[in-house]
Image (spheres, rainbow, N blue to C red):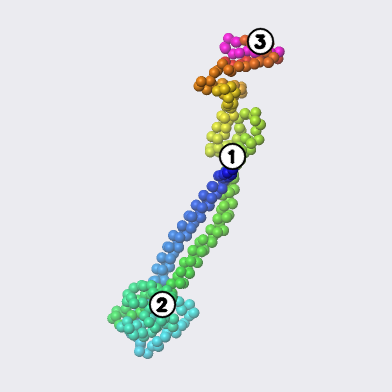
C-alpha cells in the first residue's frame, strides 16, 4: 500500500523561496562587484606598472656604463615588482633581483600576460624616445587574485551570518501572517458535528476571508445523499431557521418520499400552504 504524500507546508515553501531569493541576489551582487573590483584593481596596478616604466625610461642613458647589473632590494614589499632594462632589446643592462635574465615578454609595447618558471606575470613594455632602451616592468598576478578574492570573501562572509538570522525573522513573520489559518484550523477541528454556526474570525486577512466565507456557506448547506433511492436531502440555514430541500435525481420516483409524525394529534394545511402538525406540546409548522 502506497504511503500518502506528506502535505505541503506553505510556511516552509515561503521560507525557502525568500531565503533562496536573498541568497541568489546577494551572490549575484557579489559576482558583479567582484568583476568590477577586479577591473578597477587591474587598472590601478597597470597604471602603477606604466608609471614605473616611465620613470625608468626617463633615467635611461644616464651613466649606464657604470651601473651594476642587479639593482639592490630596498624594501621587503618591493619584491613584488620586477623590472628589466634592455639595450636595443637584446643586451640586458639592468634588472631587479627578482627578475629573470631572459626577457619578460616578447612584446615590445604595452601590456601582456606571461608565465615565467610557472609564475604568471603582468608585464608592461615600452621603449625610450630614441628606441635604444626597452624597459619591461612586471608584477606577479597572484597578489591581484588574492586581493580580489579577499574582498569577495569579505562580501560573502556576512551572508553566512545574516542568512540564518534573516531566516528566523522571516519564519517569525510567516508564522504571524498565517496565524489566522491556524486559528481557523482549530475552530474547525474542535467543532461538534451538529454545530453549523458561522465561523467567527476577527480581523481575517484578505487572503483568508474568502475561505471563511466559503466554509460558512458550506455550514449553511449540508447535503445527505440517498436518503431514498435517487433522492438526496439538503439542509441549510435561513435566518436562524433550519430548512431542507429534497433533491430528486432524474428517473427517481418522488412518491417514495414520506414522513411519519409520532405523537401528532392532527395534520392540516394552513392558508399559506404550510403544513401544521398539532401535538400535545403545541403546533409545529413546516413551511411551504
Q: Residue 128, image x and y in percent?
A: 31, 79
Alpha carbon separation for disc pair 3 and 1: 51 Å
The residue that mark 1 highlights is 181
Residue at (36, 82) in percent of width and height: 85
Disc ID at residue 266: 3
Alpha carbon separation for disc pair 2 and 1: 68 Å
Q: Residue furthest left?
A: 130
Disc number lying in front (2 or 3): 3
Screen quadrant of the N terminus: top right
Would you identify the image quadrant in which residue 200 lies?
A: top right
Dots 2, 1 in contact, CB < 8 A: no
Q: Earlier in the sequence, mark 3 or mark 1?
A: 1
In magenta stretch: residue 151: no
Q: Residue 33, image x and y in percent?
A: 45, 61
Q: Earlier in the sequence, mark 2 or mark 1?
A: 2
Disc number lying in front (2 or 1): 2
First to last magenta residue range: 269-280
Q: Earlier in the sequence, mark 2 or mark 3?
A: 2
Would you identify the image quadrant in which residue 137 lies?
A: bottom left
Dots 3, 1 in contact, CB < 8 A: no
SS at circle 3:
strand
The residue that mark 2 highlights is 116
Screen quadrant of the C terminus: top right
Amino acid at each position: 500500500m502506497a504511503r500518502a504524500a506528506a502535505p505541503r507546508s506553505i510556511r516552509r515553501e515561503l521560507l525557502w523561496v525568500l531565503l533562496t531569493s536573498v541568497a541568489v541576489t546577494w551572490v549575484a551582487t557579489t559576482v558583479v562587484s567582484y568583476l568590477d573590483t577586479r577591473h578597477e584593481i587591474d587598472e590601478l596596478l597597470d597604471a602603477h606598472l606604466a608609471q614605473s616604466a616611465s620613470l625608468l625610461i626617463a633615467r635611461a642613458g644616464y651613466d649606464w656604463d657604470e651601473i651594476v647589473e642587479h639593482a639592490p632590494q630596498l624594501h621587503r614589499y618591493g619584491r613584488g615588482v620586477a623590472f628589466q632594462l634592455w639595450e636595443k632589446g637584446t643586451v640586458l643592462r639592468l634588472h631587479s633581483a627578482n627578475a629573470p635574465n631572459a626577457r619578460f615578454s616578447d612584446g615590445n609595447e604595452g601590456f601582456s600576460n606571461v608565465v615565467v618558471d610557472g609564475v604568471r606575470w603582468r608585464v608592461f613594455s615600452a621603449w625610450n624616445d630614441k628606441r635604444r632602451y626597452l624597459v619591461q616592468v612586471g608584477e606577479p598576478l597572484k597578489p591581484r587574485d588574492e586581493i580580489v578574492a579577499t574582498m569577495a570573501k569579505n562580501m560573502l562572509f556576512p551572508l553566512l551570518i545574516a542568512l540564518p538570522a534573516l531566516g528566523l525573522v522571516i519564519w517569525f513573520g510567516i508564522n504571524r501572517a498565517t496565524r489566522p489559518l491556524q486559528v481557523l484550523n482549530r475552530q474547525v477541528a474542535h467543532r461538534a458535528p451538529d454545530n453549523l454556526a458561522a465561523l467567527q474570525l476577527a480581523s481575517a486577512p484578505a487572503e483568508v476571508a474568502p475561505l471563511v466565507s466559503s466554509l460558512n456557506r458550506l455550514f449553511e448547506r449540508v447535503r445527505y445523499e440517498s436518503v431514498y433511492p435517487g433522492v438526496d436531502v439538503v439542509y441549510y440555514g435561513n435566518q436562524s431557521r433550519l430548512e431542507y430541500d429534497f433533491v430528486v435525481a432524474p428517473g427517481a420516483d418522488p412518491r417514495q418520499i414520506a414522513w411519519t409524525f409520532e405523537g401528532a394529534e392532527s395534520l392540516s394545511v394552513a392558508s399559506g400552504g404550510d403544513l401544521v402538525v398539532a401535538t400535545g406540546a403545541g403546533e409545529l409548522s413546516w413551511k411551504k
